[in-house]
Image (spheres, rainbow, N blue to C red):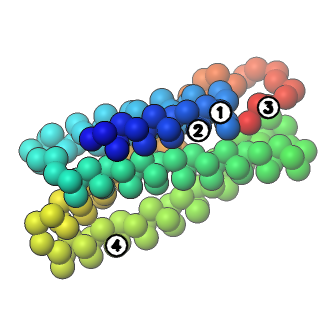
Amino acid sequence: MKSVVFGMAMVLLFMVVVYRAFGLAANVALVMNLLLLVAFMSLLGATLTLPGIAGIVLTVGMAVDANVLIFSRIREERNNGATVQGSISAGYDRAFVSILDANITTLIVASILFLIGSGPVQGFAVTLSIGILTSMFTSIVMTRGLVNLVVGGRKIEKLWI
């Protein structure tokens, strides 16, 4: 549990330092991701074990990776001369395919682990699968909603990302 808390704190700090306001949106989504993951696990009546904690840690990594991909695409679009709104829209649209591909691949691996593994490995696979689904929602839908809530409809010339 200490490693999850310490790792999460370091990730939250990193995202704010590197991506500023966008990092704050990513942090809100990351916390919501963990809350959703724990909520679904409790609905299943799952017991949190060390392999489950490892699945949560990997989920945090996958969620951060998705946000980094999105924000890098937004930076690319902005550097290529796109408008602020255009770069945000294109960044999310172009990163979606990469994020979907990585998460589907990970879901396939988690399914195989669940099918051929035993108790602890299956627990890891279940936690990872639920975490990937929640991270897809929070990384793509929630951060886009937060960014559009803050940036949408405003005349912004400079994007701090």
Quadrant placement of the C terminus? top right
Q: Nearer the viewer, residue 132 or 137?
A: 132
Q: Foreground mark, 3 or 1?
A: 1
Mark 4 = which residue?
109
Residue occupying image coordinates x 80% and y 48%: 77
Residue type highlighted by circle 4: Val
Q: Which label was assigned to residue 159?
A: 3
Residue occupying image coordinates x 49% and y 65%: 102
Mark 1 = which residue?
17
Is 130 left or right of 114, judged from the image as shown?
A: right
Mark 2 = which residue?
14
x, y (%) of residue 44? Answer: 13, 47
| SS for callout 3 | loop
Report, in whole angstroms, how far the alpha carbon at label 4 lies from the one at label 3.
38 Å
Label 1 near label 3: C-beta < 8 Å?
no
| SS for callout 1 | helix
N-terminal of the two: label 3 or label 1?
1
Q: Nearer the viewer, residue 101 or 68?
A: 68
Residue type highlighted by circle 3: Leu
Label 1 near label 2: C-beta < 8 Å?
yes
N-terminal of the two: label 4 or label 3?
4
